[in-house]
Structures are given as C-alpha cells and as structure tokens.
Image: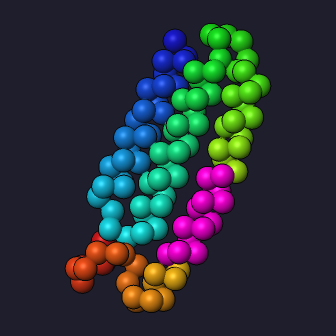
Amino acid sequence: MTEVMFVLAASLVFGIGVWGLLIAEHLLRKLLALNVMSSSVFIIMLVVSGDGGTSPDPVAQALILTGIVIAVAATAFALALMISIYRATGRPSISESDDDDR
C-alpha cells in the first residue's frame, strides 16, 4: 500500500513539474520545474526497485545517486547559460513578448 502512495505522490509531483514547465515563461521557473520532475522520477525508481517490504536494490540506489549528481551538474550548467542569456538579451526569458513580469 505504501508503494502505491509513493507512486501516486511522485506522479502528482511530476504532473506539477510538467505544468510548471508548460506555463512558466521565466527560464529559472522552467529549470525548477525540470528539477521537480527529475526528483519525482528518482522517487519512482526507488520505489520500483524495492521488493515490497525489503530494502531497495543497491544498484538502483547507485543509479539514483549518480542521477542526482548529474542533475546537480546539469542545473549548474543551465544556470550559467541563463546568466549568459540574460546578459546578452536583458530578459529572463527566451520569448519575444515584453510581458516578462509573470
């Protein structure tokens, strides 16, 4: 029963991330939505790797830990790209509209 609760919660968090990715125009909000989505994927991977009441597979734990490290590195790279986009264009989004206050 707890596995189902974790999967449902992670699915809800993934949906919130997709919604944030589609709605937000600001690049930082899009990046945060992607990070939320990746966190929910890590939760689902951890739940799926367990056998009911036993502890999760160590290989799955190592893969999740590696994924977290890669996600942090990709986030740092994306932040650096966002800073360069902001310095080049003067806008925090890549859209052509002048309505960046959202």
Q: What range of the chain is rendered magenta?
A: 70-82
Q: Image point 53% across, 75% down: which residue?
A: 81
Q: Image point 69% across, 28% down: which residue?
A: 60
Most foreground residue, 50 or 73? 73
Locate residue 94: give its quadrant: bottom left
21 lies left or right of 37:
left
x, y percentage for residue 86? 45, 84
x, y percentage for residue 2? 55, 17
Majority secondary structure in the magenta region: helix
Q: If the image is split into quadrants, where does the C terminus sit?
A: bottom left
70 lies left or right of 48:
right
Q: Quick check: is 80 in the magenta stretch?
A: yes
28 lies left or right of 77:
left
Q: Image point 52% across, 12% down: which residue?
A: 1
Position above or below: 51 against 83: above
Q: Image point 71% across, 12% down: which residue?
A: 54
Locate residue 33: give its quadrant: bottom left
Position above or below: 48 against 54: below
x, y percentage for residue 16? 38, 45
x, y percentage for residue 79? 56, 71
